[in-house]
């Protein structure tokens, strides 16, 4: 289950300058965006999109938690 979740996790568009959408194999419980220092910057609950337009340009990490406890992480570039 966990490997399937991570394998099918997709964030687009990437790079982005605003709204990003997340696709996963199960429903999404939570989305968290971390900066390169590991600080939590943004979070959404039970949505499949997140607005990154308030972030400075750079590399971020998007951690997605699925409804069954699965977790996946993807890099996101903000332009």
Image (cartoon, rainbow, N blue to C red):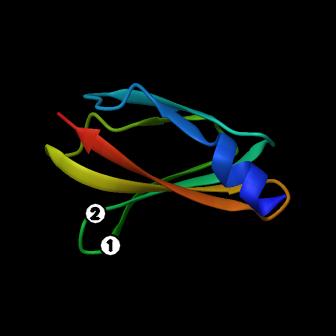
In the image, what residue occupies the spot 16% across and 48% down? 58
Place of residue 8 in the rendered image (x, y in percent of width and height, measured from the top left) = 67, 41
Instruction: Tell me: residue 23, above or below residue 27.
Output: above
Judge from the rendering whether residue 61 lies leftward or rightward of residue 47; answer left or right. left
In the image, what residue occupies the spot 28% across and 63% down? 35
Place of residue 73 in the rendered image (x, y in percent of width and height, measured from the top left) = 52, 58
In the image, what residue occupies the spot 79% across and 65% down? 69
Mark 1 crowdedness (10 Å alpha carbons): few <14, some 14-19, many ≥20: few
Circle number at residue 39: 1
Q: Are marks 2 and 1 in contact (CB under 8 Å)?
A: yes
Mark 2 crowdedness (10 Å alpha carbons): few <14, some 14-19, many ≥20: some
Place of residue 68 in the rendered image (x, y in percent of width and height, measured from the top left) = 85, 59
The residue labelled by disc 2 is 35
Q: Looking at the rendering, in which quadrant would you find the N terminus?
A: bottom right
Q: Looking at the rendering, in which quadrant would you find the C terminus?
A: top left
Circle number at residue 27: none
Q: Could you say which is closer to the camera, residue 7 or residue 18?
A: 7
Instruction: Tell me: residue 21, above or below residue 38.
Output: above
Query: How many discs appear?
Result: 2
Q: Secondary structure at mark 2?
A: loop
Res 16 → quadrant: top left
In the image, what residue occupies the spot 29% across and 32% down? 15
């Amino acid at each position: 289950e966990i490997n399937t979740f991570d394998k099918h996790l997709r964030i687009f568009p990437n790079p982005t300058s605003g709204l990003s959408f997340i696709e996963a194999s199960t429903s999404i419980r939570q989305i968290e965006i971390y900066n390169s220092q590991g600080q939590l910057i943004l979070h959404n609950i039970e949505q499949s999109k997140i607005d990154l337009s308030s972030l400075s340009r750079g590399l971020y990490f998007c951690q997605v938690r699925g409804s069954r406890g699965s977790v996946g992480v993807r890099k996101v570039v903000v332009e």
